[in-house]
Amino acid sequence: AFIVGKSQKKSDQDYGVKTSVSQEVLNLQEAFVNVAEEVKPTVASIYTEQVLKEVVPFNFFFADPFEDFFDDFFGQPAPRRKAPQKKHYNQRRIEGAGSGVVIDKDGYILTNYHVVRDAEKITVKLSDDREYSGKVIGKDAKTDLAIIKIKPSGKLFVAKLGDSDKIRVGDWAIAIGSPFGLEQTVTVGIISAKRQNVEAQGNVYRDVIQTDASINRGNSGGPLVNIHGEIIGINTLIYSQSGVSVGVGFAIPINRAKEILETLKTKGKVERGFLGVGQLENVNDVFVKQYGLKEKTGVMVGDVISGSAAEKAGIKREDIILEFGGQKIESAEKLQDIVAAAAPNKKIDVVVWRDNSKKVISVVLGEWTEE
């Protein structure tokens, strides 16, 4: 029982004890109940099926009638012929599960890219047990977001999208989804941190929301909600060595999703520029002294990808990129964001520091792909 300030006493007949619960606590409890009642109808459970073909080498061994001939008349086995090899495939059906949130009355559902990646069949189950066949109409591996379209019969409840730029560390956070297939599960925590970068499974997640609201397998693609019932993030991954929640989960800010929703609906993908430089290091005091820079700004190129736009334009290892398209580069993250926001096949001037002087290099950007 909570005892906070002025309280209302209620008796507990089962245990023969009296508890005092403040009105503030009761109001908070009611707020959680209201959020659950308002948001749960907008949350969908997503079930996927994929047929995986596995190559199984198979050797054919022949009972050759000429072997008997050699045995009978020459007293020795026939010369062995090389057995032909053929590829055989075993088909294995893989089933997956995740969550999603209805963002449009016409049947658009936002989820994670990794939930529907390579899925051949998608079933969407709403909170009222209506089931629909879903189709991926847009996906973006870089943000790990995707949009599924269903053809609904009847009314859909649509989620309210909040403003993730306004979240504060310590704010309430409520996760809703289908962990381990347990549909319409609600868990509560707080915003634990706002992280600039989190790297997982070869992907770098930018500006993610960290929460201790319990997130497990199956929560992926479901909403992270504030105390007002507004979607502030899409639950994406957890930090865990056991595969279950240890209180460190991450969500993609809803504002990052808002930036690409219309593009995913209309084009099916997000077109991003690709420069082709890697192993970037922010310029520090050592670089300033070693390379004769006039100020501590820019990023050092550690690697240039073969065949990329950067290589074709003549950008080299140990070049220090100072400007890109007229914008000053203060960090690797800023360079990545600016390049990604630029259109593919666009010609852009890049200012680099090389041999104690500035050089302007014109680059025709490539297009970023998942590969």
Image (cartoon, grey):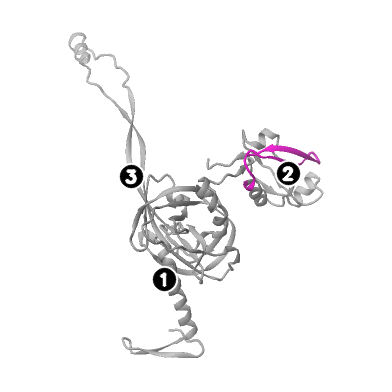
Left or right of 119 in this view: 268: right
Q: Secondary structure at mark 2?
A: strand
> For numbered disc 3, what is the local secondary structure?
strand
**Residue projecting furthest to the top:** 73
**Is 350 contained in the magenta span?**
yes
- Residue 97 place in picture, x, y as percent: 38, 54
Label 1 CA crowd tier, 10 Å (few <14, some 14–19, many 20+): few
Residue 125 vs 78, above or below: the answer is below
Please, what is the three-letter code of the amino acid marked with disc 1? Glu
Which range of residues does the magenta coloring cover? Answer: 340-365
Q: Nearer the viewer, mark 3 or mark 1?
A: 1
- Of the two numbered discs 1 and 2 on the same chain, state the one appearing first in sequence: 1
Please say whether residue 12 is visible from this viewpoint: yes
Q: Which residue is mark 3?
A: 93
Q: CA distance from mark 2 to mark 3?
A: 49 Å
Q: In the rendered view, does 145 fall on the left or right side of 18?
A: right
Residue beneath disc 2: 320
The foreground one among 163 and 50 is: 163
Q: Residue at x 60, y 44 (%)?
A: 272
Identity of the residue drawn at 63% across and 48% down: 341
Specify whether residue 238 is in view.
no
Q: Position of residue 186 (x, y in %)?
A: 42, 67
Q: Earlier in the sequence, mark 3 or mark 1?
A: 1
Decide: few, some or many residues near mark 2? Use Cα within 10 Å; few <14, some 14-19, many ≥20.
many
Residue denoted by label 1: 37
The percent coordinates of residue 104 (x first, y second) are 47, 58
Residue type at mark 3? Arg
Mark 2 or 3: in front is: 3
